[in-house]
Amino acid sequence: MAGDAPEGNYTFIPGGFSIDLKGGHNIVAGEPFDATIKAMTCSTGSNNELVENYNGTKLLDFSTQYQAPKKAADPNDPIIVEIVKGIHIEPSTGASKQAKVEFSKGVSELLTLRYRDAGVIAWHVSDPNCTGSNCFLTSNKTKEAKALRKQLPNGLTGSVAINARPWMFAICPLTFNGKMNFD
């Protein structure tokens, strides 16, 4: 691993959102790429399971966190991941901070995303209606809800690393007065 050694506190949680990027984590800046979001739990050992009763239209929150570079070139106008296609996404405007996403048996519809800059980022997804302190999935007194409370201590939240390379590099000849020489 190049660069600074990772440091800090790490917390492993037994469930949350898992984000699958269909073409892998390496994308081309400005080009659309597809993703699905899965509501997951880890009930025993390494057995990941879908939260199959996570269904219907969900209002989710999204955020983009710079990794490399560590901050936006213009902190007042950072470039963020955009959702450009989805069932409830207006094609002319897209969505970036909050959107309605359709789920069936814990798996979201296919979303088309775009990130317009090069670098490494983390894209975060969370359900504001399913936090560690209050979640509609764990609010009743059933055995399943009690088990989910343990498996979703932070509610439904997750993130994915995205590595975006430039679309192209342009090397242009040096010209004076529109000519291809130095006369």
Image: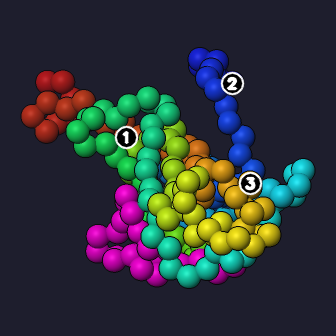
Q: Which callout, 1 or 2, points to the residue nearer the camera?
A: 2
Residue wearing tag 1: 170
Query: Which residue, as the protein is rendered here, is positioned at the far left?
Result: 177
Residue annotated with mark 3: 150
Q: Which mark is residue 1?
A: 2
Which circle's residue, 1 or 3, is located before the other in the chain? 3
What number is the disc on residue 10?
none
Name, please, the residue furthest toward the front: 141
Q: Amino acid at mark 2?
A: Met
Residues drawn in magenta: 86-105
Q: Is residue 48 above or below residue 143?
A: above
Q: Are marks 2 and 3 in contact (CB under 8 Å)?
A: no
Mark earlier in primary sequence (1, 2):
2
Distance, label 1 to label 2, CA atoms, is 29 Å
Secondary structure of the residue carrying tag 2 is loop
Q: Position of residue 150 (x, y in %)?
A: 74, 54
